[in-house]
Image (spheres, rainbow, N blue to C red):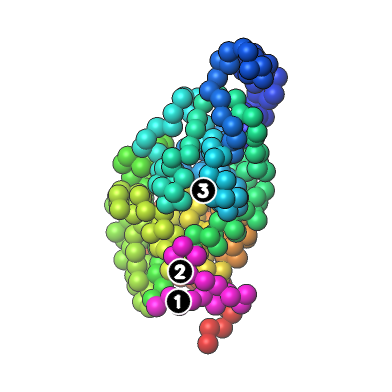
């Protein structure tokens, strides 16, 4: 009942759902729930969705990672599914495997003698846990042996920066398949956009970040590294943009939005706010009323990139 869900139901509803807790406190009585000694709660509304997981749930886990490694007896409660176990196919499992925590997960209703409750992860509001997100960025880049100084100079340096284009498919790694009309590039316009981007960015390497790429999707560090090398990211609004937290300050996101609500609004939307935290330039491109002009999008991306670079620090 955490986060968004708490707004709908709250503690009174939870009390009606979970009964007879007092039995678990009495050793002579039978507890109707699984019992554990100590538990760390990272479960949060929709946390098996990769966007919410990366922005809300995982940062608060990684912020306390050293504590969890030092206390291997603490179980980790994860998975807002209302089921006893978390589905095996969800992408968050690959992050747990990378962190070597996959054997410590527990799900469902449990009774614990001691509960560790990290700060809430917000509700699609990454600004709420900005410090945790920055700490997560630093930790995973460190796993890639990438290090930043206080002046944002990175070692090792990026040899050839990229323009990274995100694509969304109906494949197994996309849980929400009902938004194919609003979050996927039109088949007839995508080649035009790629060609125009290639012409506008002759000194960059053009790369595609596809959720149909199994190797990429099952390798969290590969995704982080792809975004770290990117000067420019062009994408439809979607969970893949969560990886923007791994970009270098001064980079640029062009977010194509078919809808326009609190998630997309400049400055306070999900990815505009993430951009502000990391130090990125963010550009919203709204297409619901006009349709996608692929060539114009590429041209405007290059124009905005040139203007943004006027404010970037000079590289020596």
How far is the residue under mark 1 from the one under mark 2? Answer: 8 Å
Q: Within 10 Å of the Cα at label 1, are there few (<14), some (14-19), or many (20+) other Cα atoms?
A: few
Tell whether position 156 is magenta.
yes
- Quadrant occupied by the N terminus: top right
| Residue 227 visible from this viewpoint | no
Vertical side of 246 occupied by 92: above or below: above
Relative to 79, 151 lies left or right: right
Of the numbered discs 3 and 2, the one sitting upstream in the chain is: 3
Determine the residue located farthest toward the right in the rendered image.
Answer: 12
* Residue, disc 2: 145
Q: CA distance from mark 1 to mark 3?
A: 25 Å
- Asked whether, in this view, residue 316 is left or right of residue 151, the answer is left
> Mark 1 sits on what residue?
156
Dot 1 and dot 2 residues touching (CB under 8 Å): yes
Where is residue 164 shown, x and y percent of the image?
A: 40, 63
User: Callout 2: few (<14), some (14-19), or many (20+) C-alpha neighbours within 10 Å?
Assistant: few
Q: Depth-wise, is mark 1 or mark 2 nearer the camera?
A: 2
Confirm or deny contact between disc 1 and disc 3 (CB under 8 A).
no
Please name the residue that numbered disc 3 is placed on.
54
Disc sitting over residue 286 in the figure? none
Q: Pick whichever, 37 or 151, lies toward us.
A: 37
Q: Please name the residue shown 68% across and 25% down the image.
A: 10
Q: N-terminal of the two: label 1 or label 2? A: 2
Residue drawn where x is 35% and y is 71% of the image: 205
Q: Residue furthest front?
A: 28
Q: Helix, strand, or loop for circle 2?
A: loop
Q: Secondary structure at mark 3?
A: helix
* Residue 64 drawn at (x, y percent): 60, 50
> Label 3, label 2: how many angstroms apart (C-alpha)?
20 Å
Q: Which residues are magenta?
A: 142-159
Q: Give the label, 1 or 3, closer to the camera.
A: 1
């Amino acid at each position: 009942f955490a986060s968004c869900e708490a707004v709908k139901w709250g503690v009174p509803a939870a009390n009606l759902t979970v009964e007879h807790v007092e039995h678990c406190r009495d050793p002579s009585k039978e507890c109707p729930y699984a019992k554990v000694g100590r538990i760390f709660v990272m479960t949060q509304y929709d946390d098996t969705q990769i966007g919410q997981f990366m922005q809300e749930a995982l940062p608060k886990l990684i912020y306390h990672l050293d504590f969890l490694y030092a206390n291997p007896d603490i179980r980790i409660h994860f998975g807002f599914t209302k089921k006893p176990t978390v589905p095996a196919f969800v992408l968050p499992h690959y992050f747990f495997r990378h962190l070597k925590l996959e054997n410590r997960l527990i799900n469902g209703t449990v009774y614990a003698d001691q509960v560790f409750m990290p700060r809430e992860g917000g509700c699609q509001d990454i600004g709420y846990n900005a410090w945790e997100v920055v700490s997560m960025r630093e930790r995973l880049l460190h796993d890639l042996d990438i290090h930043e100084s206080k002046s944002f100079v990175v070692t090792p340096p990026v040899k050839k920066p990229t323009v990274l284009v995100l694509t969304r498919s109906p494949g197994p790694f996309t849980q929400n398949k009902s938004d194919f009309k609003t979050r996927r590039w039109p088949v007839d316009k995508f080649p035009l956009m790629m060609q125009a981007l290639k012409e506008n960015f002759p000194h960059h390497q053009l790369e595609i970040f596809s959720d149909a790429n199994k190797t990429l999707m099952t390798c969290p560090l590969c995704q982080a590294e792809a975004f770290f090398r990117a000067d420019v990211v062009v994408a439809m609004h979607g969970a893949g943009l969560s990886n923007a937290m791994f970009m270098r300050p001064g980079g640029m996101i062009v977010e194509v939005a078919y809808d326009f609500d609190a998630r997309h609004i400049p400055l306070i939307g999900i990815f505009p706010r993430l951009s502000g935290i990391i130090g990125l330039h963010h550009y919203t491109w709204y297409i619901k009323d006009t349709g996608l002009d692929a060539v114009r999008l590429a041209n405007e991306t290059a124009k905005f990139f040139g203007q943004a670079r006027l404010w970037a620090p000079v590289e020596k």
